[in-house]
Amino acid sequence: MKRGRIFLNGAIHEVQPAQDGYVRLANGQTLAQDQVQWLAPVEPGAIFALGLNYADHATELAFKAPEQPLVFLKGPNAVVGHNAHTPRSASAEYMHYECELAVVIGKPAKNVKQKDAYAYVAGYTVANDYVTRDHLENYYRPNLFAKNRDASTPLGPWLVDAADIRDPMALQLTTSVNGKITQQGTTRDMVFSIPWLIEYLSAIMTLSPNDIILTGTPKGLVNVAIGDVVTTEVQDVGRLVNTLVDDKTYLTMAGRA
C-alpha cells in the first residue's frame, strides 16, 4: 500500500493514490496531486544520512569507498514534501541533488542482526538530499552549512509498505533536471546494504518508529540552478518533484520574508 500526507484546510490528512494524477482522502474525496500541499509521508524522527555509500559515487568524487559507513544526522528543518521549493543559497557555487532510497523504521530496534533487519522496516520512500558541495568541510565530515539547510531534503510523496517491495536492494534510481535524465543507478551498488546499516546503527542506539535512513546516492551529480525542476525517482517507490528558488523567494513562500 502507498500512503502520503497533505496539509489541507488547516489539518493534516493521510491520502492514497487515486486515478492518475489524483489522491484520495479518508472520506473518499479526491484532489489533484498538483493542487495539494504535500508533507513528508511520515513525521520524521532521527534522520541518518550516508555519505559515499555507492562505490561509483565515491570514485566520481575521487574518493575510495569507505571501509566504515560515513553517517551523519539531519534535523527536521531540512525536510519538505513533494512539489515543494528548496532555496539555492546565493553563497553556493555548486549545489547538487542526491537521489536516495529512504528506509523508514517501523518499530523499536536495538542490537538487530542483519538476518532480522527487514522485520523492523515499515516501508520506503524517495529522498533528494541536496548538498551545497563547496560548503562541505570535507566528504568525511559533512557540516551543518552544507547538509542541514532549511528545505534541503525533499521526501516523499509516498510511504510504500515494506511488504510491497520485493527486493529493496534491486531498485533503479533516476534523476532528471528539467526533464533531462542526468543520473541513473541501482541500489545493488550500495557499499553497505540496508540490513547491514540497520545492524550497525541499532548497535549504537535504539532506532525508533519513523526514524529514517537515507542510504546514499549513485554517480551522476550535476550542478543545479535557480528555476530548475529536479525529479528523483526510485523504482516501485515513487517520483519526487522539487523546484529550486532563490533565498528571498523561499522566505516569501514560507511567510518569513
Image: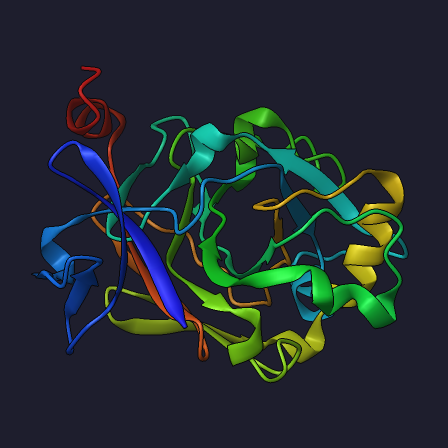
**Colour setting:** rainbow
Q: Position of residue 35 (x, y in %)?
A: 9, 53
User: Foreground: 175 or 212?
Assistant: 212
Q: Position of residue 252 (x, y in %)?
A: 15, 23
Is residue 66 left or right of 161 when viewed as pictured?
A: right
Q: Residue at x 50, y 69 (%)?
A: 161
Q: Residue at x 45, y 40 (%)?
A: 43
Q: Is residue 198 above or below residue 237?
A: above
Is residue 168 left or right of 207 when viewed as pictured?
A: left
* Residue 243 appearing in the image: no
Is residue 217 left or right of 18 when viewed as pictured?
A: right
Residue lying farthest front?
27
* Residue 76 appearing in the image: yes
Q: Position of residue 180 (x, y in %)?
A: 29, 73
Q: Residue at x 68, y 70 (%)?
A: 56
User: Foreground: 46 or 122?
Assistant: 122
Q: Is residue 225 above or below residue 185?
A: above
Residue lying farthest top?
257
Query: Which quarter of the figure is the C terminus placed in?
Result: top left
Query: Which quarter of the figure is the N terminus placed in?
Result: bottom left
Q: Is residue 51 above or below residue 116?
A: above
Q: Quadrant of residue 53?
A: bottom right
User: Foreground: 6 or 249?
Assistant: 6
Q: Residue at x 71, y 56 (%)?
A: 52
Q: Position of residue 179 (x, y in %)?
A: 24, 71
Callout count: 0
